[in-house]
Image: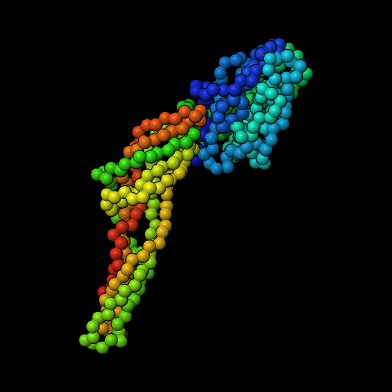
Amino acid sequence: MFAVSVGLFERWTHVHLSCFLGSGANRDVSFWKPDHCCSLGHVAVDNYNKPSGVFAKEIKAGTLVKPTYFVQVWTDRGSGAKRDGVIWRPVCPPGYIALGYAATGNYAPPSADDFRCVKSEYVTPGQWTWVWNDRGSGARDDVSIWKASPINPEGQTLNAMSGIKRHGDMDIPAYVLKSKYVVVHNEKPAKNVDIYDVKYNFNNKKILRKEPLQLSARTKVQNCAAPEGSPSILAERLLSFSLETESSWSFESSVEIGVTVQVSAGIPGLADVSVSGSVTTTFTVGTAGRRAESRTDSINAKVEARPKYSVDYFVTGTRYTADIPWTGKMRTTFEDGTINIENVKGVYIGVQVAEIIVTADAPIRCG
């Protein structure tokens, strides 16, 4: 099962640039982060060109968490750069690992809301690849910037940077995501999806299953004491029963796994062509999106019993399982705030009980 959805941000996002222009360092460097949540580590490149990197979204609950706090690793004090630069190490809760560090253009720590640590079971050892150091910058402290790279195809490239306050190797292990738990997208990332104006195509409805169902316990009416030739008695009672229904809406779309989808639609009748009520169902892409409902109802039962006989009666119905094609509108809100509205189609799959009646067994002569 996928645990993390990552999207490439080199094509479409605006980024925040923290650089060391004017510092006098022998080599240029710039640090980048996505404008939207969430980063697993900022990206450092030895130039001022927009880099390749990823943002991440959680698919499996508990995979990603915010760091507890950030520790300052290095500042560019004394460098003479046009803009301040600070490197920060995220400190993660127990059982979680930071795959990269953060850079800021001031001395305030980054917001934990924009950063994520990864549950340790979803990472694998990587190797350090050198990116930059500040030789010639004039900063009071030295720094070397590295990025964690995969050792083999089991690791997923993030290009996330880390740093150490010296000119030399990192003194901690490198980690990257395990690729088998990652689904990658290179399109503009969606924040949420709303589906509305749903219309059902009852002409193409398919009944997948139809089965009788007993909905209540048996109730007995007895007329044993009446002498032969007496009139029958008519018992009238209100019988309670429980109904369970299921609904799900699948749809055709390239929306990435993990995005929240909200469907607003009526519930189509499986035994007829009616549409009742209006419900709102929320789920995430990659899950079943199933809506289950249980309710109690009742029916007035009238059962006749002849003299010297008893009759058992109960509530029955027919359980339908069917799918119905539908069309509608889909409004996608992207992480950058833009909105796209398009037509969408899919299939409704439901389980409902219909044809609810009172059923009586054959009369039994009193013993």
Query: Could you tell me which residue is drawn at 38 percent across and 59 percent down?
Result: 243
Residue 179 visible? The answer is no
Answer left or right for 186 relative to 22.
Answer: left
Which residue lies most toward the bottom here?
227
Residue 38 position within the rendered picture, expressed as x and y whole percent measured from the top left: 57, 32
User: Which residue is at 57% across, 22% downward?
Assistant: 15
In the image as oriented, which residue stretches furthest toward the front? 277
Q: Nearer the viewer, residue 332 or 172?
A: 332
In this rendering, is residue 28 above or below 340?
above
Q: Report whether residue 331 is seen.
A: yes
Q: Position of residue 67 (x, y in %)?
A: 65, 36
- For the residue pair 269 and 57, the one nearer the viewer reads as 269
Where does the image place residue 168, in percent across and percent down from the top left? 72, 21
The residue positioned farthest toward the left in the image shown: 229
Between 122 and 270, the residue placed more toward the observer is 270
Determine the residue positioned at 60% across, 15% down. 48
